[in-house]
Amino acid sequence: MEEKIVKVLNEMSAYLTIAQMKKLQEIMLDTFAENKIEKSNVANNDFLQMFLDAKKIEGCSGRTIQYYQTTILHMFSKMNVPIRKITTEEIRAYLSEYQENSHCTNVTVDNIRRNISSFFSWLEEEDYILKSPMKRIHKIKTKTVVKSVISDEGIEKLRDYCTESRDLAIIDLLYSTGIRVGELVNLNIDDIDLEGRECVVYGKGNKERRVYFDAKAKVHLKRYMEERQDNNEALFVTLDYPYNRLKISGVEIRLRSLGRKLNLERIHPHKFRRTMATRAIDKGMPIEQVQKILGHSQIDTTMQYAMVNQANVKSSHQKYMS
C-alpha cells in the first residue's frame, strides 16, 4: 500500500504545488492507513476522554476538566445516541429541559451551553464530525448584575478579627494582588520576593506572570513565614501537623467562616480579586495594566471585574451636575 501511495504522489507532483502535495499526502495516508480507527465505531465516552486529554494538554485546571466531564456526561445520560447523530434540536431540547427540571438561572444554563459547545467544536476541529450542532445555538441572554466588592471597612474588620498570622497574610495578599485562589495555594516560599514586594504566579494555561503586593501584605507575610515551624516549600500550609499545602477548599472555608462571623456579605477568594480590580480602576490605573496584573487574555474580561464604585459615581454627579 505504501508503494502505491508513493507512486501516486510522484505522478501528481508535476501538476500540484508543494502545499497541495502535502495536503494530498495527508489525505491519502489518513484514508489508506492500515491501523486507522473507524470514527463511527468510537464510543461517546471515548470521544469525551480524548477531549479531556486535549484540554489537559492545553493547561486547563483540574476543576475545569471536572466541570467539562460532569456536564457532558450528564448530556450523554439524556441522549442515548452516538455523538455523530446528535442534532441541534436535541441539544436545544436538552438545555430547555435541564433548566426546567433544575430551576437554575440563565447564567448556569449558558455555562453548560459553553462547555457542550467547546466539546463539539473540538470534535469538528479534529474531523470527528462534519459540523458542530452547537453553531446555531447562540449565547443565552443573562441579566448584568453589578457584583459587590469588599468595602474598606470590611477589610479592616477581617484583619482585626484574624487570630492567625497565616489568615492575615492570605487576606492581604489576595487584597493587594488580585490573584486567583488556585494561584495562591500553588505559591511556594521561593516565589516570594519580600524586598521587591512581588511574586511570580502561574495562571490559566500555566502562563507565568509577575504580581505585586503592598507594605501591609509584606509585613504579614514576613511575620507568618518567621513563625512557621515546618519545612514545607508551600507558602501557605494547614495550621496543624503534618502542615500540608493548603487547598483551595481550605481557603474558601476559612474566608467564608470569617465573613459569616462578622456578618459581612458573601466573603470568598474571588471577591478579593474583583475588589482589587475595582480599586485599581477607581484610583486611575489604566485598564490595560489591570488586565496584565489579573492575567486576562481579553480586556473585556477585565471590564467585568472592574465595576465602577457607585460612591464615586454619586460624588462625580454632585461635582459636575449640582
Image (tube, rainbow, N blue to C red):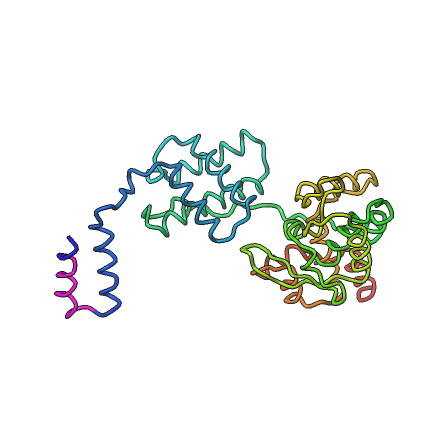
Which of these two is toward me, 157 or 213? Answer: 213
Residue appearing at x 73%, y 57% in the figure:
276
Q: Is residue 102 left or right of residue 283?
A: left
The extreme right residue here reads 160
Count of labels in the image:
0
The spot of residue 111 in percent (x, y) is 54, 43
Residue 248 at x, y = what percent?
Answer: 66, 44
Give, as a single range, the part of the protein colored magenta.
5-16
Q: Percent position (x, y) of residue 49?
A: 42, 41
Q: Nearer the viewer, residue 74 or 238?
A: 238
Q: Is residue 59 above or below residue 13?
A: above
Q: Position of residue 93 (x, y in %)?
A: 44, 34
Question: What secondary structure is the magenta-colored segment mainly?
Answer: helix
Res. 199 image quadrant? bottom right
Residue at 51% x, 44% y: name it: 65
Q: Is residue 77 magenta?
A: no
Question: Could you tell me which quadrant the C terminus lies in?
Answer: bottom right
- 184 or 98, nearer to the observer: 184
Q: Give me the residue at 44% from left, 46% from top.
A: 53
Residue 262 is drawn in which quadrant? top right
Lateral position of residue 226 relative to residue 91, left or right: right
